[in-house]
Image (cartoon, grey):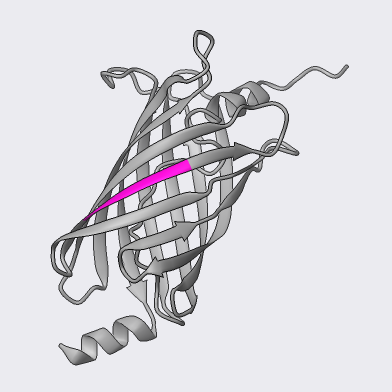
Amino acid sequence: MQSIKPIFFFVLSLCFTSCVAPYGDLQTAETLDEGELEVGANYANYSADPDQQNAQQEQLGLQVAYGLRERLDVRLSYSYLFSAIGGEESHILGIGPKYEIIKDKFSVYWPVGTALDLEGFWQMHPTLLYTVPVVADRFSVTASPKYLWSLDNNTNDAFAANFILEYRTKNDRFAVRGNIGWLYGESEEKSFDFLNRQYTVGFISKFGLGVSAASDEM
């Protein structure tokens, strides 16, 4: 039997912090207009310490979304995860469709992701997004539960709950989003236990026909 590389153990540990496609969300229930493009960058901090005293992993991420048609878009994400303590790192790629069931309020997102550093390591993250506007067209809160479904035999499934705050500019071209999330799953002591907490902050920019039309109306 061949020796297992250290990156294998690191990625397995990430299954409880990033779950291949990192479990934090930086989106609302709203989908993009047809032909509209959204680009964003984010930073995340993951910790198994409930008091968030010691960060175990950090993340730098990029995300791109494109509106395919009314109420349907596709989203691609790339994340670079690293540990300041152990020096391990991993590259995560995810992609999936998002469908808006109730306009601007309720959507389903279904990404599949893989760790580029480890062959055969895949997961799917069926996700629900429910958005409540606080200040119309400017500030909103989104609740986002998701199930982390492992497609290999090396990791367990898990459940995550996220809350996203969004502030967007008047012309809807830029937005700032922040997320706090909790991960639950099987631990050494319990079949369902707290595993991880994460904080994410990101900046989003929109391009395309949808933004141009909104700008022309102002």
For image coordinates 25% across by 62% down, the residue present is 175
Query: Can you give x and y, in whole percent of width and height, for residue 59 in the image?
Result: 43, 38
Residue situated furthest bottom in the rendering:
216
- Answer left or right for 72 relative to 171: right
Magenta region: which residues?
A: 141-146
Depicted 118 relative to depicted 61: above or below: above
| Residue 8 image offset from top left, x and y in percent | 67, 25
Residue 61 in percent (x, y) is at 44, 48
Q: Residue furthest left?
A: 135
Vertical placement of residue 83 versus 63, above or below: above
Residue drawn at x 31%, y 68% as measured from the top left: 104
Quadrant in which the C terminus appears: bottom left
Reply yes or no: does residue 70 show up in magenta: no
The quadrant of the rendering that contains the N terminus is top right
Q: Residue furthest front?
A: 102
Magenta-drawn stretch contains 144: yes
**For the point 51% across and 28% down, which residue is it?**
16
Query: Image check: 124 left or right of 73?
Result: right
Residue drawn at x 32%, y 67% is 205
Choose top left, top right, bottom left or bottom right for residue 84.
top left
- Camera-side residue: 4 or 112? 112
